[in-house]
Image: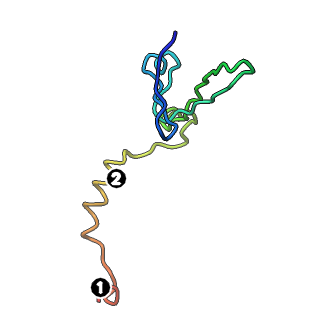
Amino acid sequence: MRALSTLSRKGQTVIPAEIRHKLGAEQGDQIIFTVADDDTVTLQVVKRKRLASLVGILAATRNYQDPSEYRKYVYATKSQLRYPEDIRE
């Protein structure tokens, strides 16, 4: 597969979409450029670790409350908080 890209004045270029798709490159991934003795350049994609990929990696030792339910509880009870008089002044 071959594709053409133009080098900008700042030394930047865009990796054509068909090459990105073939390599599986996504936003945030890093690219390793390797130049061989014959001036052939190869690209290797280094995948960025995504937080979502860590979900479920460790067993939960307790059940956690849904954050939206906790938020509702905090907003419902914050009006009941009492402050010492010197804090309000």
For the C terminus, the image quarter is bottom left
Q: Position of residue 65 (x, y in %)?
A: 39, 46
Q: Position of residue 52 (x, y in %)?
A: 47, 35
From the image, tell me which residue sits under label 1: 88
What SS does tag 1 mark?
helix
Residue at left 63%, top 28%? Answer: 33
Q: Does 22 sit above or below residue 30?
A: above
- Disc 1 + disc 2, Cβ < 8 Å: no
Of badges 1 and 2, the one in the foreground is: 1
Near-viewer residue (18 or 38):
38
The total of numbered circles placed on residues is 2
Near-viewer residue (5 or 73):
5
Q: Position of residue 18 (x, y in %)?
A: 44, 16
- Please indicate whether residue 80 sits to the left or right of residue 30 in the image: left
Disc 2 crowd, CA 10 A, few/some/many (<14, 14-19, 20+): few
Q: Position of residue 59 (x, y in %)?
A: 57, 36
In the picture, residue 41 is in which quadrant?
Answer: top right
Q: Does 10 sit above or below residue 72?
A: above
Q: Does 33 sit above or below residue 10?
A: above
Residue at left 75%, top 21%? Answer: 37
Tag 1: residue type? Arg
CA–CA distance in space, label 1 to label 2 = 26 Å
Residue at left 72%, top 21%? Answer: 36
From the image, tell me which residue sits under label 2: 70
